[in-house]
Image: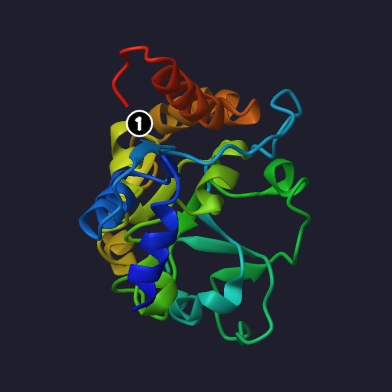
Amino acid sequence: GEVVNEIKTLNNFDYLIVHNAKMEQFIIERGYVGKVVRLDLFDYLHDELRPVTQNPYSGTIAVAGNLDKAPYICDLGTVDNYRFNLYGINKTLNLDGIKNADYKGCLPSDEIPYLLDADYGLVWDGDSLDTCSGTYGKYLLYNNPHKLSLYIAACKPVIVWSKSAIADFVLKNNIGIAVESLTDLKNIDLHDNYDVFKNNVAALKKKIAHGYYLKAALEKITDDIKGNKNEI
């Protein structure tokens, strides 16, 4: 099928830069024979010295991206101990009845890191609060969503799906929490560890502002080509 054809095409390349360990495992299990380097996080080039929007903790969560991919937003009223600020394209969702959500419009990608107003950023896709479902939700099992990097550029800790490929990175770097269902937020105090998360996010923000992750991946490949013994 399609996957077989894609792997055939990928096997024309000696090296692949993949998003993370889950994606690496996926393509190797399906027959990729070259060498694989993990990116771990997308860079997000921006001015790290320009101030971002910072307000005292208020229990607000940002959702940024194409909101049409996220019908679960229509059920956020049930997570009424938090407020949600929504940013991005919305052509299909009726947000009128959601008392704890505010639609903030569509901001350019080079401006949104400085303007995003919330305590946390949420990485969640699909039609359900209970799990990331559907095509977009399932893709989170393997990909590094660009919005994770946006939230880091905005200096916001994150909330991610516990089964997503990026949950490992988020927990290892201690930049937020992973939940199985958004209804779990009913019983979680996001103020706990908030300052620790924020400090850890600030360290990553400096890296992605200057392309650290892509440079590191390319260096691993050039070292390998030169025969240096660093492990890929």
Residue 35 occupies which quadrant of the picture? top left
**Of the residues shown, which amino acid type is indicated by label 1?**
Asn
Protein image colouring: rainbow
Q: Residue at x 42, y 46 (%)?
A: 19
Measuring 44% from the left and 80% from the top, which residue is drawn there?
75
Mark 1, secondary structure of its residue: loop
Quarter of the image with the N terminus in it: bottom left
Task: Work out whether residue 61 or residue 213 is closer to the camera in this orientation and state it.
Answer: 213
Q: Tell which residue pokes out farthest to the top in this image.
A: 228
| Residue hosting label 1 | 173
Q: Is residue 182 visible?
A: yes
Q: Nearer the viewer, residue 173 or 219?
A: 219
Left or right position of 136 against 183: right
- Residue 173 in which image quadrant: top left
Residue 221, percent across and down? 45, 27
* In the image: residue 86, left or right of residue 81: right
- Position above or below: 210 against 2: above
> Residue 6, position in %: x, y?
41, 65
